[in-house]
Amino acid sequence: MIGKIIGAIAGSHASKHVQGLNGSGGALLGVAVPTLLRRLSPLSLIAVAAGGYAYKKYADRREADKLERARPSGFAEPTRTQA
């Protein structure tokens, strides 16, 4: 019971560093993740870690492509000056 309370507090504090996650969502993750990790086998833990790593690489690549497309091509309209 005390472990779940500590996990909820830690998750709530960790959610401040994750975009799109509020305090209550972090508290739920803080309670659910340790329980889930306890029930998974070592092979499934490795699969979850590899999937998370692959998703992060995919998301980073998408973000880089988005930034590359948003970059101007080098041709810029001349600035207007007042007479």
Image: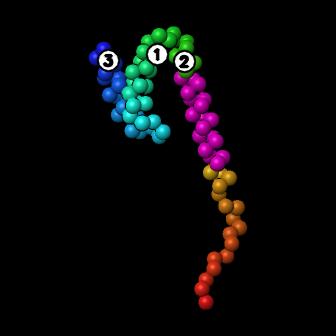
Q: Secondary structure at mark 2?
A: helix
- In this rendering, position of residue 19 left or right of residue 79: left
35 vs 66, nearest the viewer:
35
Q: Secondary structure at mark 3?
A: helix
Where residue 21 sits: x, y (%)?
A: 45, 36
Residue at figure coordinates x 62%, y 46% from the top left: 64
When the figure is inspected, residue 15 is found, relative to residue 69, above or below; the finding is above
Residue at mark 2: 46
Structural distance between the alpha carbons of marks 2 and 1: 14 Å
Residue at mark 1: 36
Q: Name, please, the residue furthest toward the left.
A: 2
Where residue 17 sits: x, y (%)?
A: 41, 39
Which amino acid type is shown beneath numbered disc 1?
Leu
Which amino acid type is shown beneath numbered disc 2?
Ile
- In this rendering, position of residue 38 left or right of residue 65: left
Which image quarter holds the C terminus? bottom right
Residue at figure coordinates x 35%, y 25% from the top left: 8
Please report the bounds of the magenta region as a residue range: 49-66
Residue at mark 3: 3
Residue 72 in view here = yes
Which image quarter holds the N terminus? top left
Quadrant of the rendered structure where residue 51 is? top right
- Residue 25 part of the magenta-drawn span: no
- In this rendering, position of residue 50 left or right of residue 33: right
Nearer the N terminus, badge 3 or badge 2? Answer: 3
Marks 3 and 1: CB-CB under 8 Å? Answer: no
Q: Name, please, the residue furthest toward the bottom.
A: 83
Residue at figure coordinates x 55%, y 12% from the top left: 43
Nearer the N terminus, badge 2 or badge 1? Answer: 1
